[in-house]
Image (cartoon, rainbow, N blue to C red):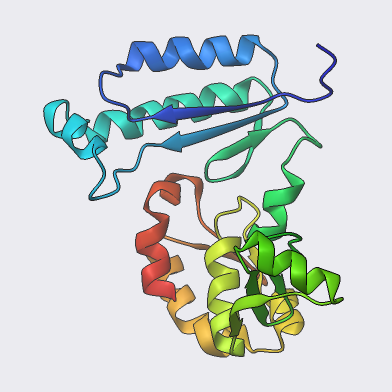
Amino acid sequence: AGYEAVSIDLMIGVPGETPASVERTVAETIGLGPDHVSLYLLENVEGLPFEEVLARRPVDEDTAVASYSAAREALEAAGLRQYEISNFARPGGECRHNLKYWRYEPFLGLGPSAGSHIGRERWTNTASLEAWAEALARGGTVREDVVELEPAAAAREALAFGLRLVEGVDLAALGRRLGVDLEALFGRRAAELAGEGLLVRDGDRLRLPAERFLVSNAVLSRLL
């Protein structure tokens, strides 16, 4: 069809799924030769009708984790390198859009409801098309939910996003960029977690070991 790149999203931990069905799905995915694959574990959000489906057909968490691990190994073996907890790509096929968030780089959103984050300031444009158009005609914008982040808060966010990446975070470089001493804020706790095998410290770089990806939230809650 003329597409230069193909990306496929897969969901694991779905009611009715079996290890064999996951294996077939991943094999079919690899056979299509995609440049990028996202591999997500289904999360239940309380209060949605889907809760009733899960109540009737509960998902075994250990089986879902085993399926994730098997799929991860198959994708890596096929040349789709894991670069983030849920994302795999051929060299050069990484999602540049999402990498900006994970690396805590600035971005500008244009149009109604669009979000932006530049420096320590974050905001959302008004959701009203009329108000946005009127402001634009006057040469301005209507910004809502403006947040001015304190340095320590920005550092916590940057680590929470950055440690999702396989490459992890360069603490020294990030600290210089944010103007905050990350060693003073997080060094002691990072050392404790590294001692427990929950983080890996290599010089200035801090990262999650691959076998801890699926408990990243628990690790981050202790670090941050």
Dividing the picture into quadrants, the one containing residue 62 is top left
Dividing the picture into quadrants, the one containing residue 223 is bottom left
Residue depicted at 55% across the width and 9% down the height? 28
Q: Left or right of 63: which side holds 21?
A: right
Against 219, is 51 above or below? above
> Can residue 106 be seen?
no
Residue depicted at 67% across the width and 81% down the height? 121
> At which x and y percent is residue 213?
45, 49
Residue depicted at 51% across the width and 17% down the height? 26
> At which x and y percent is residue 212?
42, 50
Residue depicted at 71% across the width and 89% down the height? 179
> At which x and y percent is residue 4?
84, 23
> Can residue 119 be seen?
yes
Q: Which quadrant would the C terminus be assigned to in this image?
A: bottom left
Q: Which quadrant would the N terminus be assigned to in this image?
A: top right
Please give the count of numbered marks on the rendered protein. Answer: 0
Given residues 125 and 122, the one toward you in this image is 125
> At which x and y percent is residue 120?
68, 82
Against 149, is 171 above or below? above
Dividing the picture into quadrants, the one containing residue 65 is top left
Q: Left or right of 130: which side holds 217?
A: left
Q: Left or right of 101: which side holds 189?
A: left
Given residues 27 and 9, the one toward you in this image is 9
